[in-house]
Amino acid sequence: MEINLVSQPDYAMAEVDLAADEQIVVESGSMAAMSSNIEVKTEAKGGIWSSVKRVAGGEGFFINTYTAEGAPGQIFLAPGHPGDIRHFKLSGEELMIQSGSYIASSPEVELDTKWGGAKTFFGGEGLFMLRASGPGDVLFGSFGAVHEVDVNGHYSVDTGHIVAFESGLSFKVRKVGGLKSLFLSGEGLICDFSGQGKLYLQTRKPASFVHWLNQFRPVKSSND
């Protein structure tokens, strides 16, 4: 499998070249184009109940497995929102990925929604984390650009900006109020990281963008 990222950083796509009979697992709705010899199989990853849990985290019921039948093939992948894509090559370690940021992975990569830390993030922002373990290739996307932080000690992040982080980082999620509650409904969530590892952030936050758009939404007058 060979992966090239194109049209970065604002509207990135992943160009994936598959060898004959090679496969890639793709989040539903992320396929943009593909060779005519590529076949797709749709399934509920990990069973129906596991898939329902993934829906609660913002993903679809199903994932698709694409196979280059009998000859090399090519597939283009793109997230549903504008932003960048990153390619992470696992070599035995684990990567925690915001469920809405996951795009694709090698078939040998295990995606776990049941690990203990996943439910810690499930809160006011609907953030749910997947744990990806390798070896293998993983593609994830961001809303806006990706900002990498090498954490060595302590670091705090609004959960709405988290895309992914390495397993060398431990974390604790806490609620915050104050000024944030004046602009967004409910309390916000902050994640306090500690340890050593790489943290991937997105430069824009979907909830804040939706709130900004809301001011332009037509409001029906009481006289209408």
Image (cartoon, rainbow, N blue to C red):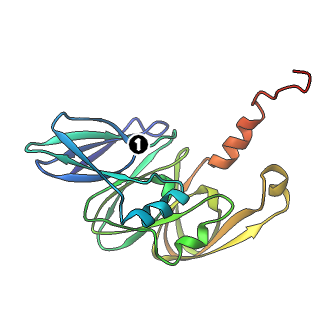
- Image location of residue 110, percent across then percent down: 33, 68
Dot 1 crowding, Cα within 10 Å, few <14, some 14–19, many 20+: some
Q: Please, is residue 95 above or below residue 143 in the view?
A: below
Q: Which residue is mark 1?
A: 29
Query: Which quadrant would residue 31 be assigned to in this image?
Result: top left
Residue lying farthest left? 70
Q: Please, is residue 146 above or below residue 215 in the view?
A: below
- At label 1, the amino acid type is Gly
- Residue found at x 39% / y 43%: 30
Residue lying farthest top? 224
Q: Which quadrant holds the C terminus?
A: top right
- Image location of residue 137, percent across then percent down: 30, 59
- Residue found at x 50% / y 57%: 55
Query: Which quadrant would residue 216 be assigned to in this image?
Result: top right
Q: Secondary structure at mark 1?
A: loop
Determine if residue 206 is in view: yes
Q: Give the number of marks.
A: 1
**Side (left or right) of 205 relative to 184:** left
Q: Please, is residue 123 above or below residue 23 in the view?
A: below
- Residue found at x 12% / y 45%: 69
- Residue found at x 55% / y 56%: 201
Determine if residue 154 is in view: no
- Image location of residue 213, percent across then percent down: 71, 36
- Image location of residue 75, percent across then percent down: 26, 40
**Side (left or right) of 180 relative to 51:** right
**Side (left or right) of 52 relative to 18:** right
